[in-house]
Image (tube, grey):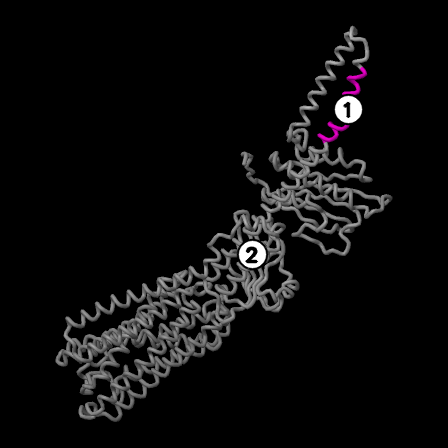
Amino acid sequence: MTGNINLDWALAAVSIFNVVLQLWLGLTVLLNAERRSWGVWLMGGGLLLGAAFFISHTAILGQELFFAANVDGLNFWWQVGWIPVMGAPFAWYIVILWYGGFWNSTNTRLRRRHRWWMLVVIDMAIGLAFLMIFFHPIPSYEQIIFLDLSTTPSVYGIPILFILFPSFMILCLALSIDALRRPEPADRLMGDLARQRSRPWLLGASVTLLAVSVLVTLFIYRVFRNARNFDAVEMSITRIAIFDLTLEALVALAVILLGQAVVSYEVFTGKVLPRRGFARQWQTTIALAAGYAAAIGWSLAIHLRPIYSLLLSTLLMVVFYALYNWRSFLERERFMERLRPFVSSQGLMEQLVSPEEEAASSAAGLFGAVCRDVLDTNEAHLIPAGSLSPLVGGTLTYPPSARDNAKTIQPTADLLTGQYRTIIPLDPDIYNGLRWAIPLWAERGRIGALLLGTKASGSLYTQEEIEIAQATGERIIDMLAGEQMARRLMLLQRGRLTESRVMDRRTRRALHDETLPTLHSALLKLSSLPRDNPAVQDAIKSLTAVHQQVADLIHTVGGVSAPMNGTHNLALADLLRQTVEAEFADEFNSITWDIAENLPPVDSIAQEVIAGAVREAARNAAVHGRGGKSERPLNLTICIAQRDGLTVTVSDDGVGLGNTPALTSEIPAGSGGGLILHSTMLAILGGSLTVEKGENSGVKVVIRLPLGSEISTKPA
């Protein structure tokens, strides 16, 4: 076009660069949108219109470089290029209004401010379309070159299209900037934060496009005022090319700014969180577009033969695809390196035999790894809830220096037990700087929440990071609960075995030291009596048999324990009444029963677990309720109700827990292994056991079991 290879190379390269970026962005917005509303279609269509314009622009450059006499081809691309040029500013303004919340409500400041301006813009767009269809105001490429505008509708020698269109373009972009400066609140989760972060990028893109519009307007008026003959234009062809290159570069800058807003905060795709892979793909696309555009632009500038251009394009395609695969492989390796602590074996056997402090340290290390290496967060708190909280224990905190902050956080019940499944924002003033809450779920329902502060880098969390954090938090809670459950059962089993051995030794010692000598003395006394008495002979035979049986029993190790209850055919309420009144009737001044009607049937195994827990709670009340004062009155109340499952409440009016605060997720120290065992067994069945302060005084033990729990009775 100019004869200057470097200038022609730059013109073609930047034009192709704009084609690739806008085409990729338009297709990405349309294909990755969560819900393809009309605004998404308009945004994607506007980007595709921009790509179409630069396709026509590149085609004009190519026609001019190779086929200077091909006027028909130049005219075709010249006419086609005006369609996206006229549609893109209007689409941009409408998209910015949609992004700013113009249609969210009928009575907003943005709507009142732009209602009439939008009608003006729509009228101008309709007028331009009417002018294009019926009056053909666009001069041909040849007429533009020679400034022969005699057949074109003009005003003072300037085509009317060149008067209306610059005004229309400047008005659309100026109004877009105003809408971006003061948008309405977003109607999607985290929309306000994403809008706040993306607004500088969108403002930068709008200002850049406005600068392009102003430059185009000034150029048009200058050309039609000063250039009246072909020689003037021919003399300034290099200057025109430099001006064209400047406009292309400004458009490329605007596209990069727009792409940064799209991929970093997903303001047009409707996603709640940006995706890290999305941003990496955008960076790769920029590099690919720059390299490809530079190579193809060079081939056009030096008039490379078509076959060589085709071969060059093929080589570039293969090289860039190989580089993309290489980068993808590196990212996968880094991703697996970060995930290795979470997918590798956690050493369950070592954890079971190690002290509880070491197990907690292992979980804290795993939690710290995900917070440091994956989330890059300043502060995080993993709070267990639900049936697993008695097993998991307290809150895990990152970094460890934030433990004092964790003590002051009072999460609401809805935050820990609500039914939401996506990340929700928190009030940083209430939660001491924490900004986000991630729900943690298991098959049985909510098991906790992960509270996060801001990222150390100041950016937003990505979708992949939140999914990894959610899965890791759920795994840590399950891991701690499983380890604690297995450890408690092992410790209790060891205790039972020890007790069994001690009882066995005591029994054999008593039989050997007391029972056998007594039987032996009785046999000796009977042997001194006359043997002709049949009764004496029968007594001697019986005692001899008993003596032999006891001697054999002493040398036999082991035994079978009787079942906890004598029968499994009783209803739960009858079983609890029989158990408590038979064993603790003399321990309390009164035992009050509050049993709801029409209680659901309970599995026999669940009955045994609940009965054991009630017995242990009653025993603790009887032992500790009077506080060492035997004359103090003590009453027991047992309530059986159906509230969100089966609930059994055992409460007393004794001395209570003292100054210890109400505990809803931990078994108080000093209660022995009984409540620990029963809380573990209830957790296996999907239930829970909590210890709280009584309403007035005393202690209240609440036992919950969800209805419909399928409890396997198959032998382990």
Question: Alpha-carbon neighbours of circle 1 within 10 Å: few (<14), some, or many (≥20)?
Answer: few
In 3D space, how far apart are the residues under numbered discs 2 and 1 (Cα atoms)?
A: 59 Å
Q: Earlier in the sequence, mark 2 or mark 1?
A: 2
Does residue 510 belong to the magenta stretch? yes
Query: Disc 2 on helix, strand or loop?
Result: helix
Residue 149 visible, this angle: no
Q: Whole-percent x and y of residue 96?
A: 41, 73
> Which residue is pictured at 76% across the width and 13% down the height?
539
Measured as percent of width and height from the top left, residue 619 is found at 74, 41
User: Residue 91 lies in what quarter of the image?
Assistant: bottom left
Boundaries of the magenta span: 507-525
Left or right: residue 34 versus residue 636 is left
| Residue displayed at 52% across by 63% down | 371
* Badge number at residue 283: none
Report the quarter where the N terminus lies. Answer: bottom left
Where does label 1 land, which residue?
Answer: 517
The residue at the far top in this view is 532
User: Which image quadrant is residue 494 in?
Assistant: top right
Q: Amino acid at mark 1?
A: Pro
> SS for tag 1?
helix
Observer-nearest of 619 and 697: 619
Query: In which quadrant is the C terminus drawn?
Result: top right
Dominant secondary structure of the residues highlighted in magenta in the image: helix
Residue 306 position by quadrant: bottom left
| Nearer the observer, 564 or 686 | 564
Label at residue 363? 2
Q: Is residue 616 left or right of residue 473?
A: right
Query: Against 610, is 527 above or below?
Result: above
Front position among marks 2 and 1 = 1
Choose between 189 and 87: the one closer to the eye: 189
State whether residue 222 is above or below residue 648.
below
